Amino acid sequence: MIAEWVAAGNEADEFAEKGAKIVIILDNASFHKKAEYLQKIAAEMPNIHLEFLPKYSPDYNLIELVWHSAKEFIANRLFKSIEELEYLLHQLLNQGELIIKWGRKLKNKGNALITV
């Protein structure tokens, strides 16, 4: 990023103040909060701001709705092979066959996600 900034005719020392700002929204996975990563980002990428979702808020994380909908579709089914399961997941996720209930709310209850 800084190299592009300088290549465009700007001063490297002005990047932190005047360069583009990037906000990255993350969930609270432990590897997202590792001190060494956070320190490295703060030191080397001053224009990146990390924003964390509130704890235990799967309803704010859209991938949880997608994954929950996929799990509902494949639960309690017997697959003859891993390839059969992979094919079904491909159809659901890549070929548009998964129906996602976007209005659904997810609640976190321990390690389980419960739909409302």
Image: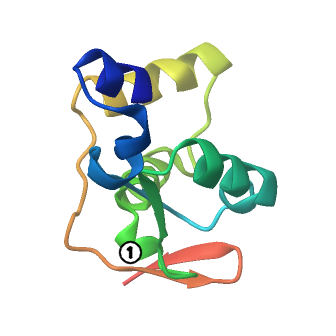
Q: Residue at x 80, y 52 (%)?
A: 36
Q: Is residue 29 left or right of residue 85?
A: right
Q: Residue at x 42, y 29 (%)?
A: 2
Q: Which residue is mark 1?
A: 59
Of helix, strand and loop, which one carries label 1?
helix
Q: Residue at x 23, y 48 (%)?
A: 99
What amino acid is found at the position of numbered circle 1 in the picture? Asp
- Graded by Cα atoms within 10 Å as few (under 14), some (14 to 19) or many (20 or more), the crowding at tag 1 reads some
Please say if 96 is above or below 23: above
Tell me residue 53's x, y (percent): 47, 73
Q: Quadrant of the C terminus?
A: bottom left
Tell me residue 49's x, y (percent): 44, 59
Please say if 92 is above or below 52: above
- Residue 11 appears in the figure: yes
Between 106 and 74, the residue placed more toward the observer is: 106
Q: Is residue 107 left or right of residue 5?
A: right
Q: Residue at x 34, y 23 (%)?
A: 6
- Residue 81 appears in the figure: no
Tell me residue 105's x, y (percent): 33, 79
Please say if 62 is above or below 5: below
Please say if 53 is above or below 95: below
Q: How many marks?
A: 1
How was the colour assigned to the protein in this rendering? rainbow
Between 11 and 48, the residue placed more toward the observer is: 11
Q: Quadrant of the N terminus?
A: top left
Q: Is residue 81 left or right of residue 19?
A: right
Tell me residue 10's x, y (percent): 27, 29
Q: Is residue 90 left or right of residue 81?
A: left
- Residue 91: image quadrant is top left
